[in-house]
Image (cartoon, coloured by chain):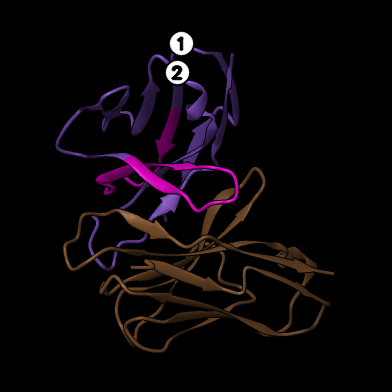
């Protein structure tokens, strides 16, 4: 029972390169979230998906695209990476079909853009 | 949209003393207020939450209070122990359904002095 799995755990990019962060959950919940964490700024919501086939912007969506491929997978894409996107990225999802409010987070993906 | 402010950003207390972290929120329609603890190198984990129909909730050494009129809520940790050292985040949302947009504060780094 892995919960929320993110890949890769670490990545270094050059400015202008593209990449996709992958997230998969096995908790059978409809909603999934992508956050970024920066020192002194906490966790900021990038995008979220209430259900398969739907996505909505969060607080800081600029420079990112997302795809809710199916119920299990929610990917985050950087089309042209910028140094300002250097951050730790977390994917999260609630557990099960009951709406308790608790989010379960992956272990994070540390991205550095040079 | 919702804005959550959290204070202080860092807090150092003597082992055995109490620690208090405070948050304010802007959206009067928010009715779910979780607190998360993040240990080094890991994703945040829920430690306690409160819904707007109650003013206080306790779980062993941890308690959360909510003042809906003033739009602020607080985390209280009593008899602090070394394992309480971590980063703590408050959050707020309108409900906790699949479509809920959960907004986090900027975090408090709590250090417990032996």
Image mark 2: chain: B
In this picture, residue B11 sits left or right of residue A67: right
Circle 1 packing at 10 Å, graded few (<14), some (14-19), many (20+), is some
Write down the quadrant of residue A86 in the picture. Answer: bottom right
Chain drawn brown in the picture: A
Q: Is residue B25 magenta?
A: yes
Question: Residue at the spot x=48%, y=28% of the render?
Answer: B84
Q: Residues within 10 Å of mark 2 (few under 14, many from 20)?
A: many
Per the image, label 2 sits on a secondary structure element best described as loop
Residue B45 located within the stretch drawn in magenta: yes
Residue at 67% over, 83% down: A19
Q: Residue at x 79, y 67 (%)?
A: A83
Q: Quadrant of the N terminus of chain A?
A: bottom left
Q: Percent position (x, y) of residue A84?
A: 75, 64
From the top left corner, tell me how far across and down residue A7 is, in percent.
Answer: 57, 75
Quarter of the view holding residue B78: top left
Host chain of mark 1: B
Image location of residue A63, percent across then percent down: 64, 76
Asked if disc 2 and disc 1 are in contact, CB closer than 8 Å, the reply is: yes
The quarter of the rendered structure image containing the C terminus of chain A is bottom right
| Residues drawn in magenta | B22-47
Q: Secondary structure at mark 1?
A: loop
Counting from the top left corner in percent of width and height, residue A113 is at 79, 70
Q: Is residue B82 depicted above or below B100 in this figure?
A: above
Apparent side of residue A101 relative to residue B83 in the rendered image (left or right): left
Q: Quadrant of residue B111?
A: top right
Mark 1 sits on what residue? B16
Q: Give the side of residue A93 with respect to residue A37, left or right.
A: left
Along the line of sight, the residue nearer the viewer: A39 or B30: A39
């Amino acid at each position: 029972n892995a919960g929320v799995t993110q890949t890769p755990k670490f990545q270094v990019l050059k400015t202008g390169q593209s990449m996709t962060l992958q997230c998969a959950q096995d908790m059978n919940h409809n909603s999934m979230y992508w956050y970024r964490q920066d020192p002194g700024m906490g966790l900021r919501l990038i995008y979220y998906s209430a259900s398969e086939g739907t996505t909505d912007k969060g607080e800081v969506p600029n420079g990112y695209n997302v795809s809710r491929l199916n119920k299990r997978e929610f990917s985050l894409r950087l089309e042209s990476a910028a140094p300002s996107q250097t951050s730790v990225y977390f994917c999260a999802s609630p557990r099960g079909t009951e709406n308790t409010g608790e989010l379960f987070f992956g272990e994070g993906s540390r991205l550095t853009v040079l | 949209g919702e804005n959550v402010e959290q204070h202080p950003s860092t807090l150092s207390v003597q082992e055995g003393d109490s620690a208090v972290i405070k948050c304010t929120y802007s959206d009067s329609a928010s009715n779910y207020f979780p607190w998360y603890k993040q240990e080094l190198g890991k994703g945040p984990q829920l430690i306690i939450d409160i819904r707007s129909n109650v003013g206080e909730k306790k779980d062993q050494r941890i308690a959360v209070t909510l003042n809906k009129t003033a739009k602020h809520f607080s985390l209280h940790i009593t008899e602090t122990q070394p394992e309480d050292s971590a980063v703590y985040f408050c959050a707020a949302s309108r409900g906790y359904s699949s479509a809920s947009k959960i907004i986090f504060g900027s975090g408090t780094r709590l250090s417990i002095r032996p």
